[in-house]
Amino acid sequence: MTVGLGEFGRIRAYFAPLAGPGGLGLLDDAALVACAPGRQLVMTVDAIVAGVHYLPDDPPDLVARKLLRVNLSDLAAMGARPLHYLLTTALPASHDDDWVARFASGLGEDQRRYGVDLLGGDSVSTPGPAIFSLTAIGEVAEGAEIRRSGACPGDRIWVSGTIGDAGLGLAVLKGGYATLPAAQRAALAERYRLPEPRVTLGPCLAGIAHAMADVSDGLLADLGHICEASGVAATVAVESLPLSPAAAAAIATAPEARARLAARARLAAMGDDYELVFTAPPGADEAVASAAAEAGVPATAIGTIASGEGVHLVDEAGDPVAIDGTGYRHF
């Protein structure tokens, strides 16, 4: 019988090397975090569950990187710069020392990429499935945070990057879209497994965006959160949704124009893109373009904010486009 490192052995071997100064070598049950004058700490927590947020056979390093990135995306949506994180793991016995080592390696890779460090956390066992919870901590200048509640009638609606890739990627990983070229199928799968949190763009939009959220549950669902918090309505033009070449190719497999329009609309309800959806006044187009260029991420205007409530998807003629559901819901 092989004896593993055990809880504290794993912490010493795999996670203590990831700790920053505030983590105190992971030798204490709490960490120390300083906050510079004139700055505010921004904190968020998200959990991912095997079979719900990632496929059980996904590589451990990619699971770790997705876990970190979905939380960094929440910080980006407030315009915050990421600093630290806390981690809790609930692992079944099948996740041995090698699995944990590969998981920690993925965390280390993205720590270097995003300039964050580990402060501490907890590790427990479970009969399954594996569950991970990560609390991310960032900072923003006092009063510079971008909340969901600031959208105003007349604002233009923008979204970063492209929409629908991650949902299509999950379908690819489950065997769908087999007729797409291998490179396009791989690109879509990558977008599901490894999102790109817009940590550079978010802070660049401070003073420009009136309201912002990240696209985790689906563009329409997360835009709906902005509308609800702000007490406004949104209209989104389905043809304006920015698509990657792979997503455009997937839509093109639909047999006729009406089916292709419906397929495009469904992309707006797919989750896991982790792009930023935000509103800005109509005179801010140049400032938005400048911020997007500085961050190296495209931003596309997709609609407008008006008085009222709800999110309305329309076609090129302005007619409503029906869609079943606006995004992912756990309950």
Image (tube, rainbow, N blue to C red):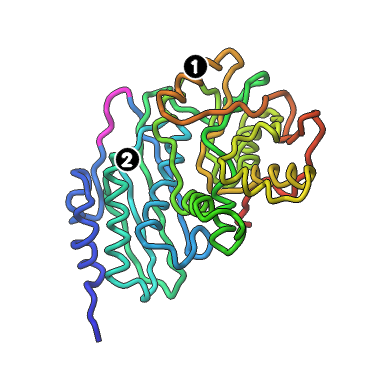
239 up-or-down from 280: above or below: below
Membership of 195 in magenta stretch: no
Amino acid at dot 1: Ala
* Residue in view at x 59 percent, y 39 percent: 243
Question: Which circle's residue, 2 or 1, is located before the other in the chain?
Answer: 2
Element assignment for label 1: helix
Q: Which residue is mark 1?
A: 287
Query: Which part of the image, by quadrant, shows the C terminus?
Result: bottom right
Image location of residue 114, percent across then percent down: 32, 40
**Label 1 Cα crowd, 10 Å radius (few <14 / some 14-19 / many 20+):** some
Q: Which mark is residue 114?
A: 2
Name, please, the residue furthest toward the top. 283
User: Quick check: 266 left or right of 171?
Assistant: right
Answer whether labels 2 and 1 touch (C-beta < 8 Å). no
- The part of the image, by quadrant, that contains residue 242 is top right
Q: Is residue 69 left or right of residue 301?
A: left
State the SS at label 2: helix
Residue 235 vs residue 24, the one in the foreground: 235
Look at the image and give the residue range highlighted in magenta: 34-38
